[in-house]
Image (cartoon, rainbow, N blue to C red):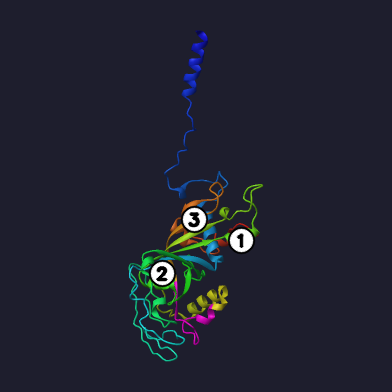
Amino acid sequence: MKASLVFLSVLTAASAVPLHPPQIQLSTENPHEQDVGVMTRPSWFTSTLMARRMLALSTTGSVSTIFPAQDSSLVHEHHAKGEGKHAKGEGKAHSKGEGKGKGKGKGKGKGKAKVHGKEEQGQGKAGAWATPPEVAGQSVALSEYIADCSAEANGDPTFLGLRIGTTFRNIAAGSNLSLSIDWWDHLDQTEPVYPGFPMSEAGLPRMTLFGYLEEYDEVEDAEQLEAMTSCYLAAHPDASAWLPGAKYSPHASFWARMVVEKVYWLGGFGDLAQIGWMDVDDWRAIRADSSSVGDGRGWKDVRLPGEEQ
């Protein structure tokens, strides 16, 4: 009888023990104001410096836009024969060969998109340029050239847009955009994030910028235009062939910047890096050599995985 009572008391005590440890209660405070230095993760400010450095060192990124619900304003109305010639003036195109076509496709951006499409002569028949109705409203991600050449140096990426390009046609039709950049191409220069762990792209930084494209209607300051052009061509020497106004450019082009409104950062594995939304005010206040926020460091004061200190 006594043994039975002992067994029952032990069983009762055991049943009071939870099957799983209690869940960790995450703070609802602003993560940018928390001190996470006790862990191995860099602070949010240091992470933002790393993000700005990654933008500065990147020359390409994946740009996501949305196909318009109706693409009638962007469909080529002419059916020229022979090889096309890019548009000159306000929406006029003249083909070589037998036909002569004029296009008046002028797309007006909606919301904050400030890029205005201009019709441009293409090759072949118009059907190849029209957006299939099955993909209307869907997103498309395409690799594009980028450069950190903004005169304000505030983290707004510079684009040399081609009016004929899908990305920029979608924007002209009203799409906003996001730009994804990663550090995965540098995997071979890094070390395993954990002892004995395989090399892993998942442990390296990546981020997505959200915003809208703003076209430079005219860059009146000759020095500013020269500086932006020089900066961009340092990253993309081949782009000299399609600079705005280039005599033998195959397509009409324009300068633009992406106005960054939000930044989502995924620095790597969560125990070693920050993951979440960055403070955009910090993002825009950081400069190469110093900053007016945080501890005053600039993005040149930090290193990304695999870089020499």
Give left or right: position of 193 versus 2. Answer: right
Q: From this view, report whether residue 95 is shown above or below residue 237.
A: below
Kind of element beneath mark 2? strand
Q: Is residue 290 visible?
A: no
Q: Amino acid at mark 3?
A: Trp
Kind of element beneath mark 1? helix
Instruction: Report the residue marked by disc 1.
Output: 186
Instruction: Report the residue marked by disc 2.
Output: 213
Q: Position of residue 308 (x, y in %)?
A: 65, 60
Q: Residues within 10 Å of mark 1 (few under 14, many from 20)?
A: some
Q: CA distance from mark 1 to mark 3?
A: 18 Å
Instruction: Report the residue marked by disc 3.
Output: 265
Closest to the observer, 52 or 127: 127
Magenta region, residue range: 239-256
Q: Earlier in the sequence, mark 2 or mark 3?
A: 2
Disc 2 + disc 3, Cβ < 8 Å: no
Q: Amino acid at mark 2?
A: Leu
Closest to the observer, 135 or 24: 135
